[in-house]
Amino acid sequence: GAGVSQSPRYKVAKRGQDVALRCDPISGHVSLFWYQQALGQGPEFLTYFQNEAQLDKSGLPSDRFFAERPEGSVSTLKIQRTQQEDSAVYLCASSLQEGYQETQYFGPGTRLLVL
Amino acid sequence: GESVGLHLPTLSVQEGDNSIINCAYSNSASDYFIWYKQESGKGPQFIIDIRSNMDKRQGQRVTVLLNKTVKHLSLQIAATQPGDSAVYFCAENIGTAAGGGADGLTFGKGTHLIIQP
């Protein structure tokens, strides 16, 4: 079956531009997570959805970051007025059920470069 | 500081030897641990997980050991192959269940496993 997919795979933005990153989770997965991975570091949690409800957004670094999952499947991470420090790989993961001991399956990520 | 960390950033082993990757965690409330493998340009790939009520869990060529007394986690890979070359992350989830859902994983920095021919 298809895994988690993300698009675009690469995105170059000029500082100040808005970007939108898409995540298609595994079909039927209830939980969806966004992570940010800086070069040479482990992923860092941004936000979590259970179906369409955003239950945890404690990891979003600023109010320029916004995520949504309006129909409980596809999710979009939007970054407004991008800054150079936003350059990173943005990973999406999904798990079948809610619950913190559910296996999270990751997509390939979107590599964002802000110039 | 980080709750999860790794002892060595790079590990070089001969093909066919066993590899051991170590990880320390600091939060005694952590009760679920996962090992991920990440190849260049790809997302993390689940390897194996272990819950705090277990000391050891085995998969295909991999074994995870958990020592709660010293808050230490290790991943053992048997008969290492060239395809095992990657960065390995340990991760934990405390599961605060805020709002009734799952919180995100906390990852360490990773260990780069290099396989020598």
Image (spheres, coloured by chain):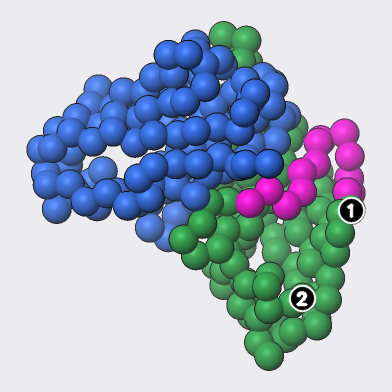
- Residue A86 shown in magenta: no
Q: Residues within 10 Å of mark 2 (few under 14, many from 20)?
A: many
Q: Is residue B30 above or below residue B7?
A: above
- Depth check: A102 or B108 in front? A102
Q: Is residue B52 above or below residue B112?
A: above
Q: Chain of mark 2?
A: B
Q: Is residue B23 above or below residue A50?
A: below
- Depth check: A97 or A36 in front? A97
Q: Which residues are magenta?
A: B45-57
From the top left corner, tell me how far across and down residue B26 is, in percent: 63, 41
* Residue at (63, 72) in percent of width and height: B85
Q: What amino acid type is highlighted by mark number 1?
A: Gln
From the top left corner, tell me how far across and down residue B54 is, in percent: 89, 39
Q: Is residue B57 left or right of residue A89?
A: right
Q: CA distance from mark 1 to mark 2?
A: 16 Å
Which chain does the blue colour mark? Answer: A
